[in-house]
Each structure stands twice: as structure tokens, then as C-alpha cells.
Image (spheres, helix red, strand yellow):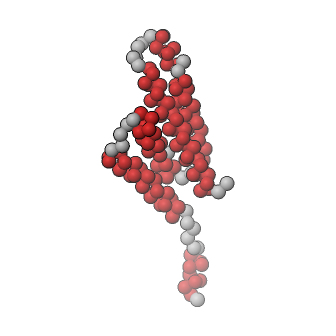
């Protein structure tokens, strides 16, 4: 698999797992109310499937992140790992009737722009420069 395809699929999978975890936590939190410090409350929480969706999301994100870190440069990888902020924001509009504001959209655009800039910067750092001998021989001819 090509490196670019690996990164794309890996970060999409990471975003999926992170989004599942965050959305599941929101649903679990909605069903956890009212908060009570007793066994009945704990049983109510741990018998609700959204808690396990959150656990699966975070475990999947952990293993996906560890796999990506073996191969991806840390700067762009860390930035791209925050794509779930954008996906959760968009999913929240649909699932929880939250509103998209200008500030939220600008924040999402800033996140995406930062990831793109770091990706381009990283790709430029890995472009091999001609060796000094090749440069000198080309200028002599």
C-alpha cells in the first residue's frame, strides 16, 4: 500500500473511532442523568450500550493512533489526529440539533488549513536534495 493511501485510510479510521467515542459519550451522558452516587446509578450506566460504544471508540482510536505513529511524522500526525473535532461538530448538528456558528466554521477551517500546511511542510522536508558532487559537476559543464 502506498504511503499516502496508508495515511489517508489511517486518519479516516482514527477520525471514525474518535467520533464514535465522543458521540457515544454524549449519548451515555444524556442517559446517566440524574447523577447519583449509588450502585443503581452505576448499574444503569454500565447496562447502557452507549458506554460500550465509547469504550470501543477509544480503544480503536488508541490502536489506530499507535499504528499511525510507527509510520507517520509526528507533527502532521498530531495535527491530523484532531480531525475528530470537525467531524464531531458536524455530527452534533445532525444528531443533537446543535447550531453551526461562524466561529465554529472558522475554527474547523483553521484546523483543516493547519493540517494541510503541516502536511505540505513535511512533504517538502523529505524531498531529497541533489548531492554536492552532482551540483558541482552540473555547474562545471
- Asked if residue 133 is positioned above or below residue 50 in the image, the reply reads below
> Closest to the observer: 88 or 6?
88
Q: What residue is at 46 percent from the left and 27 percent from the top?
A: 27
Residue 2, image x, y percentages: 65, 57
Please name the residue shown 56% across and 79% down the image. Answer: 135
Q: Is residue 11 left or right of residue 29?
A: right
Query: Is residue 20 at least partly visible in the picture?
Result: yes
Front one among 70 and 106: 106
Q: How many marks on residues?
A: 0
Residue 127 lies, with reference to residue 27, above or below; the image says below
Q: Residue furthest top?
A: 39
Residue lying furthest left in this view? 102
Q: Specify the quadrant that holds the C terminus.
A: bottom right
Measured from the top left, where is residue 105 in percent x and y? 37, 48
Of residues 111 and 68, the one drawn nearer to the viewer in this rendering: 111
| Residue 88 in view, yes or no | no
**Quadrant, the N terminus:** bottom right
The picture places residue 112, in percent across and down from the top left corner, at 44, 52
Give the residue drawn at x 58%, y 73%.
131
Q: In the rendered image of this protein, does residue 135 appear above or below residue 26?
A: below
Residue toward you, 8 or 124: 8
Q: Residue at x 59, y 78 (%)?
A: 133
Residue at the farthest right position: 1
> Could you say where residue 96 lies in the image, as x and y percent from the top left?
41, 33
Amino acid at each position: 500500500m502506498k504511503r499516502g493511501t496508508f495515511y489517508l485510510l489511517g486518519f479516516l479510521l482514527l477520525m471514525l473511532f474518535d467520533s464514535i467515542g465522543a458521540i457515544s459519550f454524549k449519548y451515555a451522558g444524556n442517559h446517566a442523568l440524574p447523577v447519583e452516587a449509588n450502585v443503581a446509578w452505576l448499574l444503569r450506566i454500565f447496562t447502557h450500550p452507549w458506554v460500550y460504544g465509547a469504550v470501543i471508540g477509544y480503544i480503536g482510536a488508541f490502536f489506530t493512533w499507535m499504528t499511525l505513529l510507527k509510520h507517520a511524522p509526528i507533527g502532521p500526525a498530531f495535527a491530523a489526529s484532531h480531525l475528530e473535532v470537525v467531524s464531531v461538530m458536524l455530527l452534533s448538528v445532525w444528531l443533537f440539533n446543535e447550531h453551526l456558528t461562524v466561529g465554529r466554521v472558522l475554527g474547523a477551517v483553521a484546523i483543516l488549513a493547519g493540517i494541510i500546511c503541516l502536511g505540505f511542510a513535511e512533504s517538502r522536508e523529505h524531498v531529497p536534495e541533489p548531492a554536492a558532487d552532482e551540483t558541482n559537476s552540473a555547474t562545471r559543464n
